Image (cartoon, grey):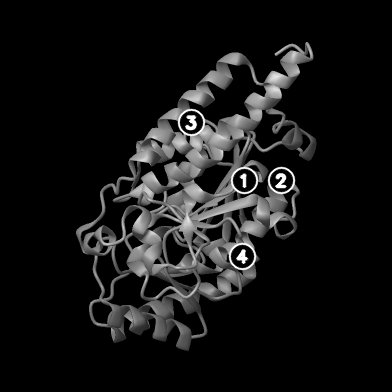
Amino acid sequence: MRVSAVAAVENSFRIPSLGTQRRLKILNLRRALQRSSESGRIVDVSPKWRKSLCKTAGMNLTSTAPHARPWCELPAADARCVVGVLTDIDDTLTTLGAITPDARAALAALCATGLHVIAITGRPMGWCEPFAQALDRGGWPVDAIVAENGAVALFREGDVLTTEYAQDGPTRARNAHRLREVAARVLREVPGAALARDSAGRVTDIAIDHAEFAHLDRAQVDAVLAVMRDEGMTATVSSIHVNGWFGEHTKLSGARWIVRRLLARDLDAERERWVYVGDSTNDQLMFGHFPLSVGVANLMAFADVLTTWPPYLTRGARGAGFAEVAARLLAERWVDVSTRHEASRDRGVPD
């Protein structure tokens, strides 16, 4: 979608001006998402995580995460203040590499009610580009995609796909040679290590596959991290890859940058009004920063290594968990819209 000027952005929150048909569409989407989230089902969980998840499904999730509350307990007042959702992609929106219908419907419903939605991912620029090309033409209904853990932003300006970088051209060029050297060292020193299959699309980092098409155990992952950090890299572990890069950018710095760039908003000044949704250890910085951050249920697969928990957890895993996040926000937003609509009608204001 095209992100307009600040005045237009503010106008987008005037939900009582929505026509009757659009309100009905939003209500139907909300009801469908609510049914999905109420089921509390865990969908398409890969076998290696299934044992962990079955022990912690549903409301028992928080028994091993005492500082996290069930997402359904989000206070109504907090839900109504939300202006946007920041979300990871892999194993948060997707299941087995593909976005699920309930997650896609959730994105559409959030967008339809005027909430901003921005994807923040470790995936490479080249992988994200096809999705960003179609942001306002039937693709994922998000404002923008920030790729490579905060290094690259992709968004549409009219009919043009804009790509911007956190680092300047000379810095990226200098780092490119170093990235190749570190990748070669990891492959040489860590038995079983392999580059992620999406590596050809990467511009600012390297990624080692540990759970997408290959499998590395905990000791191998730690060995990869040790090499990257010995080379002076920032290194993190997602649900599928070990990512390493040169520079100080992070998912959080990328989120600050894109919110300021597109929406002219100060993310830190209103961090209580943004929800962050994630699923892995590389989301911990975001979990700690946003009071309304939430982990989808498959985050529990990393329970023994997490040091920073989100304040909330969903019952559902992956796309079903994201749909649950949307359903809660939409439920309160619809109540607020309906209340204001009734008040306007009582005053004789036309719909």
Observer-nearest of 288 and 77: 77
Q: Quadrant of residue 104?
A: top left
Q: Looking at the rendering, in which quadrant would you find the C terminus?
A: top right
Q: Are marks 2 and 1 in contact (CB under 8 Å)?
A: yes
The kind of secondary structure element at disc 4 is: helix
Q: Amino acid at mark 1?
A: Gly
Q: Residue 349, position in %: x, y? A: 77, 13
CA distance for labels 4 and 3: 28 Å
Residue under the image location 47 percent in, 24 percent down: 28
User: Is tag 4's residue or tag 1's residue first in the polypeptide sequence?
Assistant: 1
How many numbered callouts? 4
Q: Amino acid at mark 3?
A: Arg
**Dividing the image into 4 quarters, which one contains the N terminus?**
top right
Residue 55 rendering spot, x and y as whole percentages: 26, 62
Residue at the spot of label 3: 30
How packed mark 4 is, by other alpha carbons closer than 10 Å (few <14, some 14-19, many 20 or more), is some
Give yes or no for contact between labels 4 and 2 (Cβ–Cβ under 8 Å).
no
Q: Which residue is mark 4?
A: 289
The residue under the point 64% across, 41% down is: 80
Q: Earlier in the sequence, mark 4 or mark 2?
A: 2
Labelled pair 4, 3 in contact (Cβ < 8 Å): no
- Dot 2 corresponds to which residue? 263
43 over 15 or under it: above or below: below
Q: Position of residue 49 (x, y in %)?
A: 26, 62
Which of the labelled discs sits on residue 225, or is there none? none
Relative vertical location of residue 226 with respect to residue 345 in this rendering, above or below: below
Label 3 residue SS: helix
Instruction: Identify which residue is drawn at 51% across, 33% down.
Output: 109
Q: Disc 2 to disc 1, how far (Cα)?
A: 11 Å
Do labels 4 and 1 touch, CB within 8 Å?
Answer: no
Q: Residues within 10 Å of mark 3 (few under 14, many from 20)?
A: many
